[in-house]
Amino acid sequence: MADIMIRKRKRMRDKDVKALAQQIEEVFGIQTFVPADGVDMAESTDYDLVFVKGDILAIVMDGKPFLTIRGILKYRPERRYVTVDMGAVPFVTNGADVMGPGIVDTDPDIAEGDLVWVRDARNGAPLAVGISLRSAAELAEKKSGKAVKTVHYVGDRLWKSGE
């Protein structure tokens, strides 16, 4: 694995896997993994990692599970997204926070403090995962300043650990 520190990796019990998958399903409205997939949980410096068949497909941050970019690519959710214009893409893929004026569309159910995923306007490709600093209505207003604090992005240590 790349530079990410992974400690205490353990296989999850079936009932814990079902509970975690249920929480993710409530967030995204899609079915993800099942206990038969062989799901492991491990600790990392910033959040806990969820391995499904050896790939890190989810994180648990402050008790809230959320898909990683690889998980988003695999399961293709249609909720909790923030779409940015193509001018913002190079900055977001280098780990920059999402600024208000670059947002072109959002999921209307986003609340301040929710984990969200950031996608580009042209292809809908996932670029990053972050914490929304505003509600969906405030994101749509495109006010200047930070709108989404980036936690995980294409090219970071978590992304490279799956290569």
Image: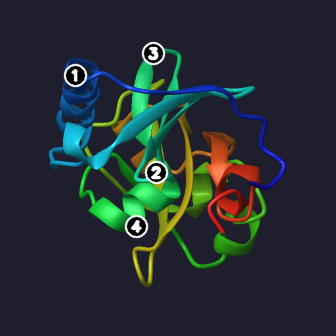
- Inter-mark Cα distance, 4 to 2: 11 Å
Q: Residue flagged by tag 2: what amino acid is it?
A: Trp
Q: Residue flagged by tag 1: what amino acid is it?
A: Ala
Q: Is residue 24 visible?
A: yes
Q: Secondary structure at mark 4?
A: helix
Q: Alpha-carbon neighbours of circle 1 within 10 Å: few (<14), some, or many (≥20)?
A: few
Q: Which residue is mark 3?
A: 63
Q: Which residue is mark 1?
A: 19
**Which numbered disc, 2 or 3, marks the residue closer to the eye?**
3
Residue at 84 percent across and 49 percent down: it is 3
Residue at 40 percent across and 74 percent down: it is 124
Q: Earlier in the sequence, mark 2 or mark 3?
A: 3
> On the rendered image, what quadrant is the N terminus found in?
bottom right
Q: Nearer the viewer, residue 129 or 142?
A: 129
- Inter-mark Cα distance, 2 to 1: 22 Å
Q: Which residue is mark 4?
A: 73
**Which numbered disc, 4 or 1, marks the residue closer to the eye?**
1
- Asked if residue 23 lies left or right of residue 66, the reply is left
Q: Earlier in the sequence, mark 4 or mark 1?
A: 1
- Inter-mark Cα distance, 4 to 3: 23 Å
87 shown above or below 151: below
**Which numbered disc, 2 or 1, marks the residue closer to the eye?**
1
- Inter-mark Cα distance, 2 to 3: 17 Å
Q: Residue flagged by tag 3: what amino acid is it?
A: Gly
Q: Secondary structure at mark 3?
A: loop
Q: Which residue is mark 2?
A: 117
- Give residue 134's position: percent from left, percent from top: 49, 32
**Which numbered disc, 4 or 2, marks the residue closer to the eye?**
4
Q: Earlier in the sequence, mark 4 or mark 3?
A: 3
82 shown above or below 21: below
Q: Residue flagged by tag 4: what amino acid is it?
A: Leu
Q: Alpha-carbon neighbours of circle 4 within 10 Å: few (<14), some, or many (≥20)?
A: few
